[in-house]
């Protein structure tokens, strides 16, 4: 018991240190990622390319990973740990200031990428992890209208792409994404079927070719009734290649 308490204290201390370090460099990366006011244009692809060229997102990854490890050591809810960590990240990054849609997009890409990377590295169950990821991002960004569905699709695509590259369980990850979209939609008052469809579409777009094993694994997950909802998805435009 004493050893467990010492371990948790060490993990929590390391988590706080990593978490504080994460936010020291975020203004710098966001200034390079976000749109220049004169051009008023910045694509998601450009954001992703910039992030791939830097290892600074590892600070958030480590923060989320340490929160998961701490939850495991304390035998508490891993999904709740992920939700709390992402909520704090978004609260500190977005705050109460006015942010453009592109700014929020860039922030959610950073946070979602770091969170799924941490979940994969920790080896935790992906279904509750990805469910918590979707719910916490939608809670924290306070998006409205079509931006909500865009965020769901984007988060699902980022998540499934990372899971496929790491050879994790696509079925579990996709199931969690759909369930998270349904829960979040219920909370913020948007159409549940549309939210589930957005998550399914993002997940399928991330794996592409309908003939691939990855596509079939995701398809099997998103076509199963989840929480009483039968998902209607859109196949990728180039899925038959």
Image (spheres, helix red, strand yellow):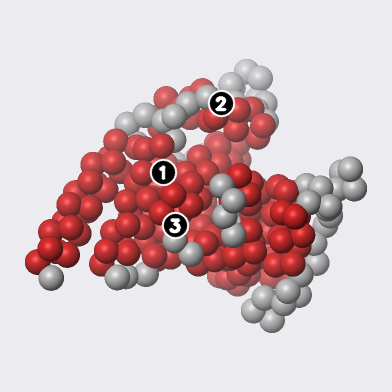
Q: Nearer the viewer, mark 2 or mark 3?
A: 3
Q: In the drawing, does residue 201 fall left or right of residue 117?
A: right
Residue located at (41% from left, 43% from top) = 61
| Residue at disc 2, secondary structure | helix
The disc, 1 or 2, on the residue closer to the chain's N-terminal end is 2
Residue 177: image quadrant is: bottom right
Considering the image in quadrants, where does the N terminus appear?
bottom left
Residue 178: image quadrant is: bottom right
Q: Residues within 10 Å of mark 2 (few under 14, many from 20)?
A: some
Which residue lies most toward the bottom here? 228
Where is mark 2, residue-wise? Answer: 50
Which percent across, then down, holds residue 241? 89, 43
Q: Nearer the viewer, mark 1 or mark 2?
A: 1
Where is mark 1, residue-wise? Answer: 61
Residue located at (56% from left, 26% from top) = 50
Q: Toward the viewer: 105 or 239?
A: 239
Tell me the CA gap for discs 1 and 2.
17 Å
| Residue at disc 3, secondary structure | loop
The disc, 2 or 3, on the residue closer to the chain's N-terminal end is 2
Residue 123, numbered label: 3
In the image, residue 192 sits, relative to residue 22, either above or below, namely: below
């Amino acid at each position: 018991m004493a050893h467990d308490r010492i371990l948790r204290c060490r993990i929590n201390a390391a988590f706080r240190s990593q978490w504080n370090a994460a936010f020291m460099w975020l203004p710098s990366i966001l200034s390079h990622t976000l749109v220049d006011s004169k051009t008023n244009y910045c694509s998601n692809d450009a954001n992703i390319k910039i992030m791939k060229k830097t290892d600074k997102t590892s600070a958030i990854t480590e923060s989320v990973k340490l929160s998961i490890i701490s939850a495991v050591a304390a035998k508490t809810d891993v999904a709740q740990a992920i939700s709390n960590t992402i909520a704090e990240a978004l609260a500190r990054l977005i705050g109460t200031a006015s942010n453009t849609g592109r700014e929020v997009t860039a922030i959610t890409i950073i946070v979602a990428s770091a969170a799924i990377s941490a979940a994969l590295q920790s080896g935790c169950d992906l279904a509750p992890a990805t469910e918590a990821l979707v719910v916490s991002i939608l809670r924290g960004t306070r998006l409205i209208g079509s931006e909500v569905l865009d965020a769901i699709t984007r988060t699902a695509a980022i998540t499934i792409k990372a899971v496929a590259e790491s050879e994790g369980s696509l079925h579990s990850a996709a199931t969690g994404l759909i369930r998270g979209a349904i829960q979040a939609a219920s909370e913020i008052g948007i159409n549940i079927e549309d939210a589930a469809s957005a998550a399914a579409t993002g997940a399928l777009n991330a794996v592409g070719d309908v003939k691939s094993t990855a596509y079939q694994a995701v398809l099997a997950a998103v076509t199963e009734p989840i929480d009483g909802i039968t998902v209607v998805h859109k196949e990728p435009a180039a899925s038959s290649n």
